Image (cartoon, helix red, strand yellow):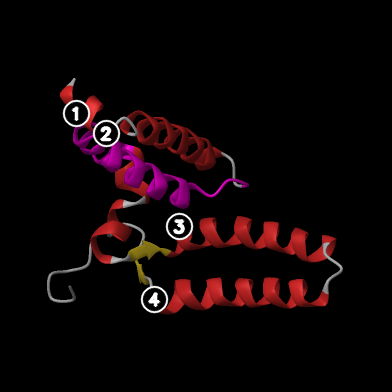
């Protein structure tokens, strides 16, 4: 109980962490919601809120399937990359179509291009069955 008195925001961190984990879990079955960003945020919030909940979260299948390889060695499968990029790009395209400001439209196009360049140049692509990179490449 002393930990709660030292940092009363731990309850807020835990609440936000579990909320993001729930949204990320829904995103696994709904292609509109991106899973990985919510699970990364859940991991961050749970780590801030409680070491015990963070250890529990990193042991779940949800974390191990969608985030473990990215957190360990900044790698993702091609399927995971596209499951993140396509829904986000669709949302940005909707914003592009709804916006009449030329500067806003140029910025959205820049964001879409930046996302794809970043994902395919900064995040290593690994084969579907491989969780981690071989020791020689790390």
| Residue position marked by numbered label 4 in the rendering | 122
Left or right: residue 63 compared with residue 83: left
| Residue position marked by numbered label 1 in the rendering | 3
Residue 57 screen position, x and y as percent: 28, 36
Of badges 1 and 4, the one in the foreground is 1
Instruction: Name the foreground residue: 49 vs 78.
Output: 49
Q: Is residue 114 magenta?
A: no
Q: Secondary structure at mark 4?
A: loop
Q: Is residue 59 magenta?
A: yes
User: Upstream in the sequence, badge 1 or badge 3?
Assistant: 1
Provide the residue span drawn in magenta: 32-61
Give the alpha-carbon distance from disc 3 to disc 2, as whole Å.
36 Å
Q: Is residue 8 above or below residue 42?
A: above
Q: Is residue 75 above or below residue 35?
A: below
Of badges 1 and 3, the one in the foreground is 1
User: Upstream in the sequence, badge 2 or badge 4?
Assistant: 2
Disc 1: CA contacts within 10 A as few (<14), some (14-19) or many (>=20):
few
Quadrant into which the C terminus falls = bottom left
Give the alpha-carbon distance from disc 4 to disc 3, as whole Å.
15 Å
| Residue position marked by numbered label 3 in the rendering | 80
User: Upstream in the sequence, badge 4 or badge 3?
Assistant: 3
User: Upstream in the sequence, badge 3 or badge 2?
Assistant: 2
Left or right: residue 93 compared with residue 45: right
Q: Residue furthest top?
A: 1
């Amino acid at each position: 109980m002393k930990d709660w008195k030292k940092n009363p925001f731990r309850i807020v961190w835990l609440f936000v962490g579990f909320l993001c984990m729930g949204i990320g879990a829904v995103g696994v079955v709904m292609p509109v919601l991106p899973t990985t960003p919510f699970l990364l945020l859940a991991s961050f919030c749970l780590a801030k809120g409680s070491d015990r909940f963070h250890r529990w979260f990193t042991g779940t299948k949800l974390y191990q399937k969608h985030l473990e390889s990215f957190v360990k060695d900044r790698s993702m499968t091609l399927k995971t990359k596209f499951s993140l990029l396509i829904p986000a790009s669709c949302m940005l395209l909707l914003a592009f179509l709804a916006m009449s400001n030329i500067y806003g439209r140029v910025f959205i196009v820049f964001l879409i291009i930046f996302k794809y360049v970043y994902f395919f140049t900064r995040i290593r692509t690994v084969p579907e069955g491989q969780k981690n990179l071989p020791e020689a490449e790390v």
